[in-house]
Amino acid sequence: MSTAPLPFRCEDIHVAIGDKPVVKGVSLAIKAGEIHALMGPNGSGKSTLANALMGHPAYTITSGHVYVGGEDVTAAAPHERARKGMFLAFQYPIAVPGVTVANFLRAAVKSRTPDEAAMKGFRKTLMAEFERLEIDPAFATRYVNDGFSGGEKKRLEILQMAVLRPQIALLDETDSGLDIDALQIVSRGINHVVGDQMGVLLVTHYQRILNYVKPHVVHVFMEGRIVRSGGPELAAMLEEKGYEWIENEVKQAAPVV
Amino acid sequence: MTNDKPTIRPQLHVREDYQARYGFADPEEYFLKAPKGINHEVVEMISQLKKEPDWMREFRHAALDAFFAKPMPKWGDTELLNSIDFADIHYYLKSTAGGSEKSWDDVPDNIKRTFDRLGIPEAEQRFLGGVSAQYESEVVYHSLREDLTKQGIIFLDMDTGLREHEELVRRYFATVIPYADNKFAALNSAVWSGGSFIYVPPGTDVKIPLQAYFRINARNMGQFERTLIIADKGSRVHYIEGCTAPTYSSDSLHSAVVELIAHEGAYIRYTTIQNWSNNVFNLVTKRAVAHQDATVEWVDANLGSKLTMKFPCVYLMGERAKAEILSVAFAGDGQHQDAGAKVIHAAPNTTSRITSKSISRGGGRASYRGMVKVYPSATNCKVSVECDALLLNENSRSDTYPTMEIAAEDVRVEHEARVSKIAEEQIFYLQSRGLSDDEARMLIVNGFFEPFVKELPMEYAVEMNRLIELEMEGSVG
């Protein structure tokens, strides 16, 4: 076994919104080059988990620990987590009127590399990623997510991931609202960026994206817990039998206390 | 374990290096300083000193009577307005024996150093067609590129304009803003000194901006520049003004009158970056007349001062005339930016667009005050008013006072007003990309002002962004 720290690990994470517990003990360990799919029905708390891991102020991690590259970031501010290599692709990306995509990304890259020289290839990198994700380069001068279609917003999220090259990317329902063409483009983008350096936690309701982005591990998430983990075949079973199948199994297996 | 959020939010400091960059003061040296207070003797002295024609001298005295007769405005920030002590102000201060010099070498050293520090000679060399630099009451330096002079363009300080082009001045002076217009226009009319006089001949396009810079140095100073710009038929001109002052504990008063006349088919853009220190009352009357097919644009940014009251106005007098007013305000601690715009549609097929953007923070107050009036004869007009206010913290304040009087048929009116706070979701989104809370807020504020900044010439856009960054500069407090 390699001694290099994992890009991402979390231990027994509990998350509350206000006083209400939503995530009730989640542990994950994601290796470099690994894609984990976290699948669950609506309202199961999977978006809450993703946002809490990134440090969203509305969600409180009440217990447990989060590590990025072996470093404990449980108490770190969101921007510190980002600088250590965590990335969250938003389910509903936020508009920042008046700030161009290029300036936004330049500011983001600069925030983690104070070295001016590192900015030299920035424009070239940016343009290459635009091309790869089949986004019109004119988007560089448009305002971040301002007036973008749903598909454009999702592509921009993946573009940001490609430019920022995190250690661990949390992709929150990146497939939602995409038509089949956009889904393929976004999936190609994800596959390209992941390579063997990065870990991915792909949060999704549907199996559809997993036809294009092949997960190494699939977790089924219900009512704030991972109820089952397995290989890609687990996703196929879900597609076939729906969440109810697992729900029933889980209920039978776990007696009510 | 609990994910503790820091309870102390980073504080954003407004213009915290203003003192070092702009708020410095020269020793007060003067050639002639009127005693404090306002009366007919002071007016007479100013007029005599300038060796003015009788009509101007009489105009000044009549204006002073109007100033005395008019009450203080009963609207706006009356509490601040009524705190102005008119008896505690010097209404005229000439700092040098000379007049307005054509070479910086002839400007006294300490004054030249001040303008050097403010970057004026450098800007002049790099991207300006002409520069006027006013220090206290008088313009101390003035230049216009030779090729522009040869085109017949006149760009002079107002006093020299009156001496050298008396007939032209007399024809237009105070025709747009009569001395009895309001109390502060009356005061300016009585004691005006300096400012710019510009005439652009028919069909002439002044391709490079002309700039004036106004500097107050002395304590308890009153600066009353007077500007008159005439763009003859089919001509084009862009005029830019900037201003700063040292920070004192006692108040100063800046009260300008600016008149623009855009003849048939002419285009005037007037850009202001107002950056007075926080002890300056800035009470300015700005008005333009746009004749047939003419366009007037006011691009008006207010960052400084204690109280600003400024509502650039356009009278659309000829068919198809256009007015565009972009008003931007940043109100910090101890500041009230009462800014806005006024448009009068007096002819058919005229168009106006008002965009106001304001930010209030740290207890600052920004008001939008606007008036659009469409006369019955002004059919088929288009009116658009958009006000956008951003509050950076709870104790800041923003108010909107829009007025519309539409008396004509077929007028298309669009009106939008928004007051917003920076959304926590926006901050989190930017933080998730690696920007700190402060950096995220600065980026959002820069974005908010972007529609204004992109209207500026590149060099000013850079300067403006820097000024905003200074205003937003943060530290944990």
Image (cartoon, grey):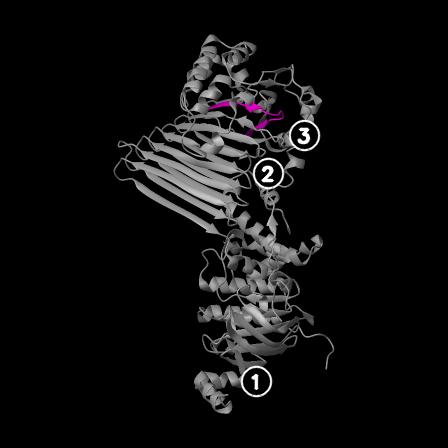
Where residue A130 sits: x, y (%)?
A: 55, 60
Q: Nearer the viewer, mark 1 or mark 3?
A: 3
| Residue neighbourhood size for the residue with mark 1, other residues' Cα within 10 Å, grouped as few (<14), some (14–19), many (≥20) | some
Q: Could you tell me the amino acid type at mark 1?
A: Gly
**Image height check: is A62 above or below B442?**
below
Q: Is residue B211 part of the magenta span, yes or no?
A: yes
Q: Is residue B108 part of the magenta span, yes or no?
A: no
| Residue where numbered disc 1 is placed | A231
| Residue where numbered disc 2 is placed | B459
Disc number placed over residue B32 in the picture, else none: none
Q: Could you tell me if the residues under marks 1 and 3 are in contact, i.e. CB atoms within 8 Å?
A: no
Q: Could you tell me the amino acid type at mark 3?
A: Asp
Please name whichever residue, A133 or A7, is drawn nearer the observer in this view of the structure: A7
Please name whichever residue, B369 or B163, is drawn nearer the observer in this view of the structure: B369
| Residue where numbered disc 3 is placed | B116
Residue B173 visible in the current orientation: no
Relative placement, left or right, of B48 versus B259 is right
Where residue A242 sits: x, y (%)?
A: 44, 84
Q: Could you tell me if the residues under marks 2 and 1 are in contact, i.e. CB atoms within 8 Å?
A: no
Residue B67 visible in the current orientation: yes
Please give the range of residues in magenta.
B209-230
Mark 1–mark 3 distance (CA, rounded to whole Å): 71 Å
Q: Chain of mark 3?
A: B
- Going from N to C along the chain, the mark reached first, 3 or 2, is 3
